[in-house]
Image (cartoon, rainbow, N blue to C red):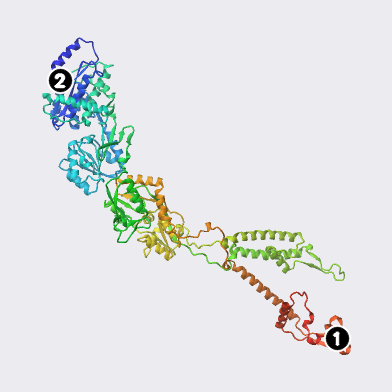
Amino acid sequence: MFSIVRSLLLLRLFTCASSIPAVIRVGAIFPKQPIKYNSELAFRYAIHRLNNDKSLLPETIVDYDVEYVSQHNSFETARKVCRLLGAGVQAVFSPADSVLAAHINSICDALDIPNIGRSAHDFSINVYPSKEYVNQAFIDVIRYLNWTRFGILHEREYGIIDLHQISRSVQAEVHMRQVSRGSYLSILNDFKNKEIHNVIIDTSSDGISILLKNILQQQMNEYKYHYFFTSFDLETYDMEDFKYNFVNITSFRLVDIGDVAVKQILKDIENYGHHIFQSPDFSQHSRKSFSLESEPALMFDSVFVFAMGLQTLEQSHILDLYNVTCDAEIPWNGGLSLINYLNAVEWKGLTGPIQFKEGQRIQFKLDLIKLKQHSIVKVGEWTPHGHLNITDPSMFFDSGSMNVTLVVITILETPYVMMHYGKNFTGNERFYGFCVDILETISHEVGFGYILDLVPDRKYGAKDPESGEWNGMVAQLMKYKADLAVGSMTITYARESVIDFTKPFMNLGISILFKVPTSEPTRLFSFMNPLAIEIWIYVLMAYILVSICIYLVGKISPIEWKYINPCDFNNITIGNQFTLSDSFWFTIGTLMQQSPDIYPRAISTRIISSIWGFFSLIIVASYTANLAAFLTTERMINPIENAEDLASQTEISYGTLDSGSTMTFFRDSMIETYKKMWRSMDNKNPSAFTTTYEDGIRRVNQGNYAYLMESTMLDYIVQRDCNLTQIGGLLDTKGYGIATPKGSPWRDKISLAILELQEKGDIQMLYDKWWKNTDETCTRKSPSKQSKANALGLESIGGVFVVLIAGILVAVVVALFEFWLNFRHNHEPKAVPCSDLLPGGKTVPETNERTYIQPKRCFWIEIFEELRYASWCLNKPKRPELNRVCSKCKNTSKPII
């Protein structure tokens, strides 16, 4: 090899001067492990390809020198680097080992020799993706997967990601464990006991192989586990035992082995490897098939980045070679120019697009890959500018059929979940209802089987404010004793902080269930309801006042006085038509819309009459307008109208379901009305809370009790029991969701299924099926939907008949009183000549003249006679006067002698 170099140097003396030498010498450091030959093979092939392809450096040959060092021997590493520098190398390619790379870079940095590999010093080019960006890529995936609780396994001297940055950047419960080859099994067992199902594995390739075997040994290869590897070489590991257990394994990759150009380079490296294996220099390596991992690909790209930097430098600078030594410690004056041009390189290599900034790679593409049943497939990609882009969400939210059985807990609640108690029903067939139908539909959409069972304590789940412990279905999910909780379970902040919920499949709020108020009893004088009692009093007072005013004004006004007998000059008298009684009669006649026989003549009395007529018009119109509504509308007596009414009284007790979201709402509310209601419920004895909804409904039907519950359940009950009704509107807004443990992979899958069912209308159809079944709903009278007014009964307008009868009786009594007054005035006996009683004015002789003395009359006989005459002589306008004399005076047709 030295002879070749010597001949090339002699050749340069006879050629024209060039900006870079004809031979550029580089060095490389590789570990001594015999199995780690892929990176060295890629390095050698890259130099070989570069020298054969003259498109980059047509007049320059790149020569190389390789040294091998032990992994933990820093002294040996420094000595080998100094030997390479003494041999005249202008760049050093360092290994992937970060510890050795740090020692190599410190020497190169002191002598201004470019170091290409995995370092972060001034005179270094880090072809590996920037650690800051890699961290962000992993953080984006964790957020996308919604991990709220996960573990991290990492080795002491290995790490692609910054563990502390990740733990600070995500809102999750993170469990970090430093592992070694002998501790994998115990730490995995610890994660299994703590129900940590999501794990980030940041270990070396050797550690990954051992870890995969330990995962199988611990039987942690089920669907609920998700392993996120930081290695970029997941496709190189044997995953045959994991493909058919539905375990989730995710990772990034730098090299797309499916790319045509990559496949061709891989084939060329294998052919080149077969050739050099026959060389004595490679006798230490066993002949194995080459796999293009990320480190060999990065080494290949490093060589071409160096070549492109030399090509750019050749166009504007002259590179002077100078052999530096560690002993002299004199830096190379051309190193700064070369490192600047290497920083400016932009290229697309095996590991994707390459671009640098201050020696750090800022342009690259990471493919997100995931294990499927038969292979590892790409599901997305991450770039520093575009960040995470998931191209196949179905790999994380698979809607296909899977042989997975989930444990689902529920609670009996009509109509959400109900149970058949017959002996013929077993397993999931025991349950039916709205939520059971939704669960069955979602299981087909997402692809899982399930075992449905009741929660042991028959509670939804609430946090004890004293002990801080949860109960009910929430506790079962927190302890990972169930995979799902299905039922009328409300999504609340407190529950969401300890478990996860899917998208709500039903929206609702808290409302008040109360017994239908009794109808207001129909009163006999209901016709007086259109006007308040004070209005009736004011109308009566106005009637009296106007009547007196008309009487007084009529007496004062001279126009209202007129002559009674204007032609009788001997007896001239004047009179006034507005006597006190006639004034009252005129006023009442106007009010009753009648035409009295009295007509005002003076302007003053006409003004009063007009104003009274306008007043009567308004009163009668208002009365008539309200009369129909009051007589035809059934009025209810509602003791409460809303939550404020309920809180401000003490006669009606109220409560809610124990350990439910409604109870939590009132307990934690900061609204004064609800705080007052909570204090009342909490201090009630006996307890205002119920263990089931059925118990609360029973107490409402017993009366004098209001039950606070979710509006959907209330709607179901009200439609089936016409004795119950909803009071007021909703006190809050919330939703029902399916609950899962924290970080469950099923949450997002089921959420997508719920959104799809809502868009297709399937959930609404299920709601109509269970809520609006006409066979079960009762017929409720709705005044707003009545086609005609209700017929009025005697109980509604019977008071009018009472007034009529009372008026008739009063009139009869007054008539009797008038008759009695007249009778009392004329009851004294009088001597009447018989001649005065003869008809036709006939007379009797004086000798025979007699005097008739009227007998003393009886009042009741007179009444009887009047009634008899009224019944016999209905059509006679006059009554005969002789009906009142004796029988001797009646027959006077012949003259008396």
Give residue 531's position: percent from left, percent from top: 60, 62
| Disc ID at residue 87 | 2
Identity, as a three-letter code, of the amino acid under mark 2:
Ala
Q: Secondary structure at mark 1?
A: loop
Comparing 39 with 142, the one in front is 39
Residue, far top: 14
Note whether 147 is above or below 40 in the view shown. Answer: below
Q: Is residue 647 visible?
A: no
Give residue 820's position: percent from left, percent from top: 71, 79
Comparing 137 with 249, the one in front is 249
Q: Secondary structure at mark 2?
A: loop
Give residue 221's position: percent from left, percent from top: 22, 44
Q: Is residue 705 left or right of residue 467?
A: right
Look at the image and tell me in which quarter the N terminus lies.
top left
Give residue 88's position: percent from left, percent from top: 17, 19
Comparing 395 with 645, the one in front is 395
Note whether 690 is above or below 893 in the view shown. Answer: above
Separation of residues labelled 1 and 2 (CA atoms): 187 Å
Look at the image and tell me in which quarter the C terminus lies.
bottom right
| Disc ID at residue 253 | none
Note whether 546 is above or below 392 in the view shown. Answer: below
Mark 1 / mark 2, whichever is N-terminal: 2
- Few, some or many residues within 10 Å of mark 1 (<14, 14–19, 20+): few
The image quadrant that residue 273 belongs to is top left
Asked if the residues shown at circle 1 and circle 2 are in contact, with their CB atoms under 8 angstroms apart, the answer is: no
Residue carrying label 1:
894
